Image (cartoon, rainbow, N blue to C red):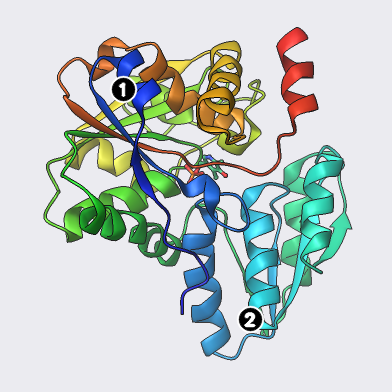
Amino acid sequence: MPLHIETPLVTSRPLSLAAGRQVTLKLEALQPPGSFKIRGMGAACEWHASRGKRRFVSSSGGNAGIAAAYAGRELGIAVTVVVPETSTAHARELIRQQNAELIVHGKAWHEANALAMSLLTEHDAFLHPFDDPLLWTGHATMIDEAVRQGDRPDAVLLSVGGGGLMAGVVEGLRRNGWGDVSVIAVETIGADSLNQAAQAGERIALDAITSIATSLGAKQVCEQAFSLLQSHPVRCVTVTDQAALAACERFLDDHRILVEPACGASLVLAYANAPALANFQNVMVIVCGGATATVDQLRAWRTS
Ligand SMILES: *Cc1c(COP(=O)(O)O)cnc(C)c1O
């Protein structure tokens, strides 16, 4: 049994009306730890467990850390998550709920990551949040399911942080004979490392992350995501934080599911019937989810 669940693929009436075309939703927000991350993380953790690793180590204060903690508890393997002081109280609580050891260290992520690296022994596995082929192969299972659940879409709409989700989705499309389905890759301004790399024609790193969508906050995308710009039909789009927040609220009203701005970013395009959708009649949105935003947090961001 894999650690992720099979999620519903539903046609959204409100989003289809807003977008003027059929919009289906792959509801990854319903995964037990709150995001699609458990697909890849679960697969990677099982792989390491079967090779005798006795502890999983992560330096993600977001959904990757939460998924690693969930996977460890399910597999009966110890987990240590090192997060920086900037991580939210809510995210820390979610990691603790999974019985993981939580270490708060450093002012920024690179300091937390350095400590995590220093802890590693031969019995430990380090789980990267997005740059690992094991993760992509696990993420690809969402497309295996979609192939069984519904019709072939013309485009898949998804959010991009470090590009692991995109790499996994394209792997899934290709292994199911859907390799010509376009990908619309959405980022928030201030976390748009893929978009800026596409414009520059090289895998540049952002100086800083200035978006509230911290789950998209990778300063540099993985090599695999960057190379897919050449080998797959990918269109990069950016949206504002405020648009992403508004989409989260509207989605909560429409579908009763609370998602992070990282996920709201993708929903913006459907709600706005964005020009990027023009050539597509049937669009599948990966509702990637995210467990770290609360209603209070969304409201506070809206008024700040
Ligand atoms: C991790 C994450 C993303 C981005 O995934 P990448 O693999 O880093 O591109 C998007 N949304 C949510 C909710 C996430 O947790």
Quarter location, residue 277 = top left
Q: Nearer the viewer, residue 103 or 204?
A: 103
Q: Position of residue 143 (x, y in %)?
A: 29, 54
The residue under the point 53% across, 45% down is 29
Q: Nearer the viewer, residue 119 or 270?
A: 270
Q: Position of residue 246 (x, y in %)?
A: 58, 15
Q: Is residue 33 left or right of residue 26?
A: right
Residue 107 visible in rendering: yes
Number of numbered discs on residues = 2
What residue is shown with label 2? 75
Q: Is residue 179 left or right of residue 225?
A: left
Where disc 2 sits, the SS reads helix
What residue is shown with label 1? 16
User: Which amino acid is tagged 1?
Assistant: Ser
Q: Is residue 145 left or right of residue 70?
A: left
Of the 4 image quadrants, the one containing the C terminus is top right
- From this view, report whether residue 12 is shown above or below residue 129: above
Q: Nearer the viewer, residue 68 or 29?
A: 29
The residue under the point 49% across, 42% down is 288
Density class for disc 1 (Cα within 10 Å; few <14, some 14-19, many ≥20) is some
Where disc 1 sits, the SS reads helix
Q: What distance separates the C-alpha of mark 1 from that of mark 2?
A: 40 Å
User: Which amino acid is tagged 2?
Assistant: Leu
Residue 115 visible in rendering: no
Q: Position of residue 61 (x, y in %)?
A: 73, 48
- From this view, report whether residue 72 is shown above or below residue 36: below
Q: Earlier in the sequence, mark 1 or mark 2?
A: 1
- From this view, report whether residue 218 is shown above or below residue 75: above
Quarter location, residue 233 = top left
The residue under the point 87% across, 59% down is 103
